[in-house]
């Protein structure tokens, strides 16, 4: 039987806490992450940016259980927050100076029992509607590989650098303090098929939509991840890709 879902922006403290509890289960319990504001007693993964983000949540039909979340930060709210979350890791000057409408996405996760099905599709459909409503032109945000062993990630990082590097006008760069070069294997020595299998599904989804990556990875030891910055120009999505993103049939 097909599982049905509903998607909405969190509108109450209860819904926000439910999203933060899900993030705790995924990012802290499953992936070993942490952070200064993580509440281990209440099992909440949170940070100082949460009050400024909109939180897109997905729930099974007929249930109030939050089983998926994506958080969204528009430029005006980022100014109130003192900057975008990603600015701790990447120099976003090319995006901020572009004069285009920006949206930062992050903290995407699903409950383990709802992965590989329609839940993420519904969540992305909700995000696509948000993009249309706010006339967003550029999407961006950090996405993660689990772990901080760069040599173990050499193949997929090199693939992203050689085949999916952002054009110069959109090419954000990892901060110098934790900058990790991504061209670790020469392109002609790379087994592209094997490397692609090692790229997380979320990153591959953005690449299929025409997304690209910034210069350099960022090693986040606190979250036990190696991060790349994804950038997507919504004007460059072709019609088929746009249909896939917003949930319409091709």
Image: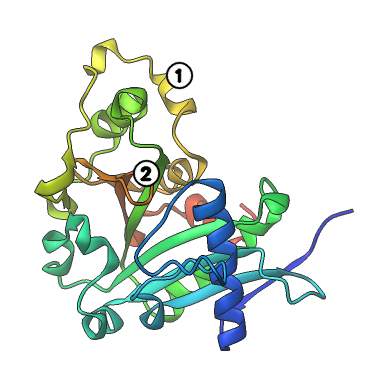
Judged left or right of residue 24, residue 121 is right
Total numbered circles: 2
Q: Quadrant of residue 122?
A: bottom right
Residue with the most extreme front position: 41
* Neighbour tally class for label 1: few under 14, some 14-19, many 20 plus, Cα within 10 Å: few
Q: Could you tell me residue 92's position as x and y percent?
A: 17, 61
Question: Cα distance, mark 2 to mark 1?
Answer: 21 Å
Residue drawn at x 71%, y 53% is 114
At horizontal 29% and vertical 29% (from top left) the residue drawn is 150
Q: Position of residue 47 (x, y in %)?
A: 38, 71
The label shown at residue 29 is: none
Which residue appears at 21% of the width and 82% of the height?
A: 79
Question: In this orientation, does residue 124 appear?
Answer: no
Query: Which corner quadrant of the image does residue 82 belong to?
Result: bottom left
- Residue shown at 29% from the left, 37% from the top: 164
**Label 2 close to label 1 by CB (< 8 Å):** no
Residue toward you, 65 or 54:
65
Q: Which residue is mark 1?
A: 194
Vertical relation: 189 (above or below) 30:
above
Residue 89 in sight here: yes
Q: Which residue carries the number 2 mark?
A: 225
Seen in the picture, residue 25 relative to 60 is either above or below; the reply is above
């Amino acid at each position: 039987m097909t599982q049905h879902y509903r998607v909405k922006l969190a509108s109450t403290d209860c819904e926000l806490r439910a999203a933060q509890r899900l993030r705790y289960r995924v990012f802290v319990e499953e992936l070993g992450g942490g952070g200064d504001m993580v509440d281990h007693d209440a099992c909440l993964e949170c940070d100082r940016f949460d009050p400024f983000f909109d939180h897109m949540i997905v729930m099974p039909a007929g249930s109030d259980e939050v089983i998926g979340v994506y958080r969204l930060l528009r430029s005006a709210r980022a100014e109130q927050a003192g900057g975008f979350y990603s600015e701790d890791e990447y120099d976003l000057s090319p995006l901020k100076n572009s004069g285009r409408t920006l949206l930062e996405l992050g903290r995407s996760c699903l409950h383990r029992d709802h992965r590989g099905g329609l839940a993420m599709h519904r969540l992305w459909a909700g995000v696509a509607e948000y993009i249309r409503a706010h006339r967003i032109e550029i999407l961006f945000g950090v996405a993660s590989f689990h772990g901080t062993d760069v040599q173990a990630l050499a193949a997929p990082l090199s693939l992203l650098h050689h085949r999916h590097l952002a054009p110069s006008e959109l090419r954000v760069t990892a901060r110098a303090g934790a900058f990790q070069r991504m061209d670790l294997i020469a392109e002609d020595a790379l087994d592209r098929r094997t490397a692609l299998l090692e790229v997380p599904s979320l990153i591959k989804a953005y690449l299929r939509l025409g997304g690209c990556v910034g210069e350099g990875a960022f090693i986040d030891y606190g979250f036990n991840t190696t991060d790349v910055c994804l950038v997507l120009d919504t004007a460059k999505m072709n019609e088929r890709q746009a249909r896939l993103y917003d949930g319409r049939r091709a």
